[in-house]
Amino acid sequence: MDFIELRNKVYKGEYSLTEVVKNTLNKILINDKKINSFITLFKEKSLKKATEVEKKIKNGNGGRLAGLIIAIKDIICIKNERVTCGSKILKDFISPYNATVIEKLEKDDAIIIGKTNMDEFAMGSSNETSYFGPAKNPWDYERVPGGSSGGSAAAVSAGFVPAALGTDTGGSIRQPASFCGIVGLKPTYGRVSRFGLVAFASSLDQIGTLTSSTKTTAYILQSIAGYDPKDSTSVNIEVPEYVEHLNDSISEIKIALPVEYFGEGLDKEIRESIYQVIDNLKKQNIFINEVSLPHTEFAIATYYILATAEASSNLARYDGARYGFRYENSDDLEEMYKITRTEGFGDEVKRRIMLGTYVLSAGYYEAYYRKAQKVRRLIKEDFDKVFKDYDCIITPIAPTPAFKIGEKIDNPLKMYLSDIYTISVNLAGLPGISIPCGLTSKNLPIGLQIIGKQFDELTILKLANYIENHIVKENYPDLFYDYTYK
């Protein structure tokens, strides 16, 4: 039963939305001790909202998302609530305003139930850098849920909520969605407002969704997409009717397979699972062909120069003087700055700040930062060439399934390579979606990525919806589940 069916049952008096929210809160309080997916729960606020929405549903004027219970990654601002960014330096900081996406969700009567765990300041691929401890993968508690939106992915995968918002800077929605066996959408850069999102890397960050189905993804994107004058990176372009056209024919879609994404380093079971989907699509006479994205090999280096440079600039504001954690036992301003940042930031954040400061420093700016910007343009041009002849691209999400907690945390380079198949999408500002497509021999989810043209989320949603309902569900019925509100 999805939230649309729940809404109908509330309207008929068969279900109480307030009771559903009570049950959801109880389920989280009891079971999240094992998973650690939430940082903050909004008990009173969510129950009050449920009562209001229930009345609106019964009066026949409930919003587009009435009946939807949703969690929010703790890097998105909600007025009068903590926004910790998974960091000690902001562990008690209260947001004075709402992000635009929060305003839109509340306007459409979604019920926000809490804030989810995440890698500190969205820097990580495993959710192990969080000040509040690692979240765990519901498929195997010894494994990571992915990052940085690992708490959001785990909350959906565990069945606590049918949907959550996350953010994606280099794969931080799509990779945890793949690890946790759910749907994760990163929209085109500029499609969804970034106002009220605490910045990591401003030219790469994008708010998106983690859900139990493509249909739910389409409903939420319909709500949160659109131009926002408060966000200078927001693009004033029409938002299509995603939900209305979700089941349209995919017969005319042309699909590209980049050879660079299926080479050495990709787990055999992941390759086989993706090609099983591709073979099924070919049987439906969908045009699929191999292509080349030649600058893919430079994506990791380019990303970690640009992202760390932007992080160095964005995180300079956390100095203890204005807000957040502050080292109090000092009479010297410079010492206060230094110790506040030393104690307030975790190792990964400090590592990225130092890398970013280095590449922006005099003597190295031209050699690293400017050159990385030029390579970024080449990576985007690779995609532009492919999209002249194709509508979307299918690739893996990660080279391996979910790895064990502690397996890569002491090896930053190995951890960074987890994002090798997702980073290029952010560098080019494209939309990408992760959908479950199989299981490994160890019963771990495998994700498939569909990349689309700029602002063409509709095509990738249609293809994802087809694969979900006509290919994957037939072979792996347990991967896509009907979220229960009981």
Image (tube, grey):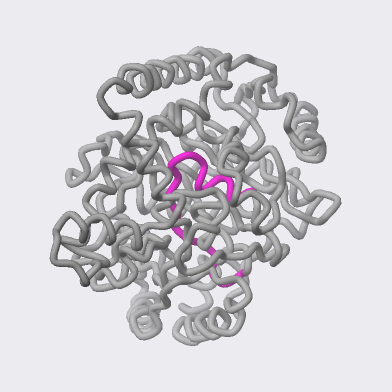
Q: Residue at x 63, y 24 (%)?
A: 255
Total residue callouts:
0
In the rendering, at what x and y percent does residue 122 appear? 43, 51
Of the pair 85 and 312, the residue shown nearer to us: 312
In the rendering, at what x and y percent does residue 104 appear? 30, 58
Based on the displayed image, in which of its 4 quarters is residue 1 positioned? bottom right
In magenta stretch: residue 265: no
Is residue 233 found left or right of 44 in the rendered image? left
In the rendering, at what x and y percent does residue 453 appear? 47, 27
Q: Residue at x 55, y 13 (%)?
A: 389
Region rendered in magenta: 159-178
Based on the displayed image, in which of its 4 quarters is residue 196 positioned? bottom left
Q: Residue at x 21, y 71 (%)?
A: 328
Of the pair 52 and 235, the residue shown nearer to us: 235
In the rendering, at what x and y percent does residue 264 appear? 74, 26
Q: Please say if 231 is above or below 333.
A: above
Based on the displayed image, in which of its 4 quarters is residue 318 positioned? bottom left
Q: Please say if 266 is above or below 337.
A: above
Q: Is residue 98 visible?
A: yes
Q: Is residue 177 visible?
A: no
Of the pair 486 and 127, the residue shown nearer to us: 127
**Where is the C terminus found, in terms of image quarters?**
bottom right
Is residue 456 found left or right of 135 in the rendered image? left
In magenta stretch: residue 170: yes
Q: Residue at x 34, y 69 (%)?
A: 91
